[in-house]
Image: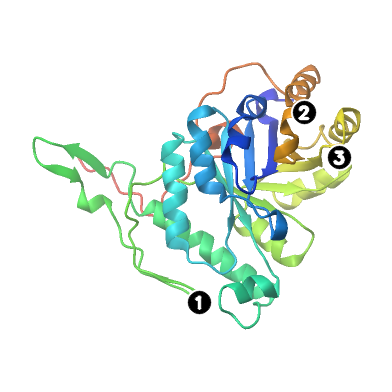
Amino acid sequence: MNVDAFSFGVAISAPANDIQVLAARTADLQAADFLILTGGAGERAGLAPIPALGFLAPHTTIGLVAEVDVSYVEPFFASRELATLDHATVGRAGWQLKVDTSGEAARKRGLSAPLPPDELAERVVEYTTVVCDLWDSWDDDAVVRDRARGIFIRADRVHRLDHVGKYFRMRGPANLPRPFQGHLPTFVSLTGDAHSSRLASEVGEVIRIRATSADEVGAVRARFPQARVLVDVPFTGMSATLAAIDGVSEVAQGIVVELDALDLGGTPLTVLAAELTKRGLRGDAPRTGTFRERLGLPAAISRFASKEIS
């Protein structure tokens, strides 16, 4: 087994009103390879994940994944905020798609009724495509910063999208340079329904699943060979959590341990990390490279990639 290929993530909900709760736990979080920060829901709604992760960025070296509600929103501002986070972390950011099919989610955004799940999935696929196209609208070498000639960017390396789709019209381009990684890794939760399967198939690069056996994990990997497959494991005590990991580790490409932020201080993530190392699932090499590289994902190729101009 390639020890560099197994990923150890932790998923927590942002605390409701105290960013210092997370700041005080960064030493615990550093034992993992990446953190997925969710915004919670209802009475457990917390801080917005993207700015909260921006606050944590200088205090960490791990990957930072923001849950983004993509149900009924526009793609331009999310693309900008995520690109900013990726620049701030020097290529350590990712995003987890959150799709809310409830009537309440639709009503909060001024709709009388939610879209049918299949239409909502179609909208999210288009949304994700537009976000990535906005990131690609600046070539990697668009920024020149040539003070002597008074040139900041090369206009021929910045592109309009002129996207006209079923749900979005977007002229573009973005108003800041391409993210450090090109595209932030896209996380999708596979929940067993048709619309999550579509998202996993069409836009998922990292797929999170619930599974209790290697056979279940293997079946998902066979269905979605383009993606990394990680298994969600609720923390229910050290012995039970390790037993759950042992049941899937031969086939899974990583795990995501689910925690409550307030429990972090009493949760031995460092012990979990040491146990994974003992099992041959992790190496001791220092973290290097972008989050995409650490996950083993291919480089993100821009749809607007320019031919080299000498």
Q: Is residue 226 visible?
A: no
Left or right of 174, for residue 50: right
Amino acid under disc 2: Gly
Q: Residue 261 is drawn in which quadrant?
A: top right
Sequence-first disc among 1 and 2:
1
Nearer the camera: disc 1 or disc 3: 1
Q: How packed is label 3: few (under 14 Cα within 10 Å), some, or many (20 or more)?
A: some
Under mark 1, the amino acid is Lys
Q: Earlier in the sequence, mark 2 or mark 3?
A: 3
Q: Indicate which disc residue 166 carries.
A: 1
Image quadrant of residue 273?
A: top right
What colour scheme governs how the chains and residues are painted in the rendered image of this protein?
rainbow
Q: Secondary structure at mark 2?
A: helix
Q: Residue at 67% of width from left, 65% of height from top? A: 100
User: Label 3 belongs to which residue?
Assistant: 214
Foreground of the two, 279 or 87: 87
Q: In terms of sequence position, does the residue under pointer 1 or pointer 3 come before the other?
A: 1
Residue type at numbered disc 3: Ala
Query: Pointer 2: what residue?
Result: 266
